[in-house]
Each structure stands twice: as structure tokens, then as C-alpha cells.
Image (cartoon, rainbow, N blue to C red):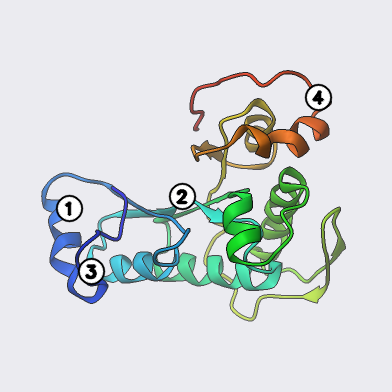
Amino acid sequence: MTIPFDGVPLHEQRPWMEELVDLGYTDAWSSEAQGTDAFVPLALTAVWAPALRLGTAIVPAFTRGPALLAQSVATMTEAAPGRFAFGIGTSSNVIVENWNAIAFDEPYQRTRDMVRFLRAALTGEKVDATYETFTVKGFRLGRRPPEVPPILVAALRPGMLRLAGREGDGAGSEDRQPEEDSSERAAEGGGPRIGTSLLSR
């Protein structure tokens, strides 16, 4: 189930979240575009409905810096240990450039680099590394999460599906525009755009 619900103030949604469990739902997923952020609704739901599994679908790879994103993921993991999966994706040029004033450059590479950084940072180790799209100097989480959560890569196109298989713990779906595929196809050696079904594991 996608949360939060439209038309109901967020602070009034506790009964709705509790009812999800009664109705047999097992998962609650948030997104991040122009409504709520992805993490606060999940944090509330972690308390209101402790039986639900929680996840983001998706958080853009661009709109938080590496350290802040690691902090957000670690905090949510600590709030719902064993119940949280983190979904990350390229998002879109509209969200990244038009709304957040960030250059939508090399989205495939940015997503890959963020997944690699998170894998390292969420273990609690100090990260001092240069990735293709950013550099992190001497960052270590002040609160190590109880585990590294599953990291899902939003993917519909073959390049992102391969990335999800190589670097992630699974793939989730997101809406993509054809013009957004150029960097992933270049990074994967080109080739035609091929429709594909959702992959998860």
C-alpha cells in the first residue's frame, strides 16, 4: 500500500495505518516527489503499525547529499529494525532540475555511486572515497544502524535492471521517460531500448 493517504492530514492517519494490518496488508511504501518526503510517513507508521514492513519507492539519488541520505536511511532502519527496505532511483529531470535546481547529469552513474556509498556507510565504517559522480571525505555515521537494510534500485530499462542485480538487493518499478535513458544506455554500451517486466528478489 502506498502511503500517506491523500485527503487526510498526516497526523490523523494512525487509524488508517492500523486498519491496513486488520485488512491483511503487509507492506507500506512511500514515495518522494512533490508531496510528503519519503521518510516521515514511514517513521510514523513504524510506531502506529509495528506489524507492517516499510519501504521507500522511491527516493531520488540526487536530492540529498551522500552523508544526509545515509543518515536518513540509517535513522529509518533504526526506527524499524528488520522491517525497512530502501528504494532509490534516478527520479526525473523535472524533479531534480526544475524543482530542486540540481543538474540531472549521469543519472545511472549517480544511482550506482550512491548505492555503493550507502553499502559502505551503513556498516558504520569511515568512508573516504572518490566515486565517478561525487567524492566523500572522511564521513562516518554517528549512529550505526542495527543492520544494512535491503537496497532496491528503481528499474524498468535493461541497464538499471542489471545495476539492480549487480549492486542492489532487488529492483522496484518507477515511471521513466525515454529521454532519461541516455546515460544508462551509454554506461551499458548502448543498444536499443527494450521493454522489460519488474524484477525483484
Task: Please provide percent x and percent y for residue 41.
Answer: 35, 67
- Distance between the Cα atoms at labels 2 and 1? 20 Å
Q: Amino acid at mark 3?
A: Trp
Q: Are marks 2 and 4 in contact (CB under 8 Å)?
A: no
From the viewer's perspective, is residue 106 above or below residue 59? Answer: above
Mark 2 secondary-structure assignment? loop
Mark 3 secondary-structure assignment? helix
Q: Amino acid at mark 4?
A: Gly
Query: Could you classify mark 3 by the number of other residues whose Cα lies within 10 Å: few (under 14), some (14-19), or many (20 or more)?
Result: some
- Dot 3 or dot 1: first in sequence order is 1
Query: Could you classify mark 1 by the number of other residues whose Cα lies within 10 Å: few (under 14), some (14-19), or many (20 or more)?
Result: some
Residue at figure coordinates x 50%, y 40% from the top left = 174
Q: Amino acid at mark 1?
A: Val
- Distance between the Cα atoms at labels 4 and 1? 45 Å
Q: Residue 21 got which mark?
A: 1
Residue at the disc numbered 4? 190
Q: Which callout, 4 or 3, points to the residue nearer the camera?
A: 4
- Dot 4 or dot 3: first in sequence order is 3
Residue at the disc numbered 2? 57
Residue at the disc numbered 3? 48
Residue 134 lies in quadrant: bottom right
